[in-house]
Image (spheres, rainbow, N blue to C red):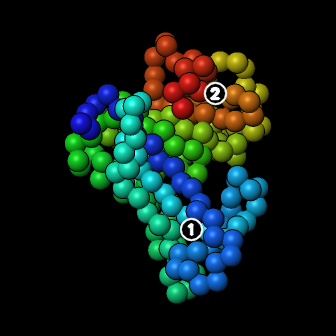
Amino acid sequence: MIGQACWLEVDDTIIEHPYAKKIECVYWQYSSKNSGFIEGISLTVLAWCDGKQTIPIKFMVYEKNSEGKAIKTKNEFAEEALEYAKNLGITPKQICFDSKFSSKSLLNKLHSFGWIYFTQIASNRVFNGQQLKMRRFQPYVEEGNLKGVGHKVNITKYCKRYYATNATGKSITSKFIVKNY
């Protein structure tokens, strides 16, 4: 069932609990949907998908210790979960995740696995020695070096967002990157 004609997705969501008084794992969290902070439970999921069905492989509920620090960050979970998928023998066609998860550590790990990723990337990341938001992007892909990442990446800008992939070749276009993301 879990074969190679699949992709993996890492994403998070907030289960809103605006009236919670004392529910474990309910914290003030930023919600992009609400454009502000809300009380809720943050759930991060690694899911397998083949285009017909989506199956959660691993998930984490965000928790804090007694000092108010994260027991495990979402990025730590993402790395752990993708390593878990690799150990299960899953070889995805690609992996997709948003800019919250695009740490240099995760990008390097995925590339070392030989896996292709497609991700959004924050505008303050340094690409070829300059922050993305300071660069003038043309309507095509630029290949280069993302600070802290030990392999070449292709980056494009589309509708004020930046997208990156470690996929290479002549077929890598802006449209291809955005579509696969």
Mark yes or no: residue 3 visible.
Answer: yes
The answer to whether 163 appears left or right of 90 in the picture is right
Question: Is 88 rendered above or below residue 65?
Answer: above
Q: Which residue is located at x 74 percent, y 56 percent?
A: 34
Question: Is 55 rendered above or below residue 180?
Answer: below
Residue 43 placement (x, y as % from top left): 51, 61
Residue 9 placement (x, y as % from top left): 45, 43
Place residue 140 in its image quadrant.
top right
Between 18 and 11, the one nearer to me in the picture: 18
Q: Which residue is located at x 60 percent, y 39 percent?
A: 120
Q: Which residue is located at x 70 percent, y 53 percent?
A: 32
- Tally of numbered discs: 2
Camera-near label (2 vs 1) is 1
Task: For the C terminus, give its image quadrant.
Answer: top right
Outermost front residue: 19
Q: Which residue is mark 1?
A: 41
The answer to whether 126 appears left or right of 169 in the picture is right
Place residue 35 in its image quadrant.
bottom right
What label does residue 27 carry, if any? none
The answer to whether 144 appears left or right of 86 in the picture is right
What amino acid is at disc 2?
A: Thr
Looking at the image, do the residues carrying marks 2 and 1 touch, with CB atoms under 8 Å apart? no
Q: Which residue is mark 2?
A: 156
Helix, strand or loop status at disc 2? strand
Cα distance between the residues tagged 2 and 1? 33 Å
Mark yes or no: residue 69 visible.
Answer: no
Task: For the N terminus, give its image quadrant.
Answer: top left
What crowding class fits label 2: few (fewer than 14 Cα within 10 Å), some (14-19), or many (20 or more)? many
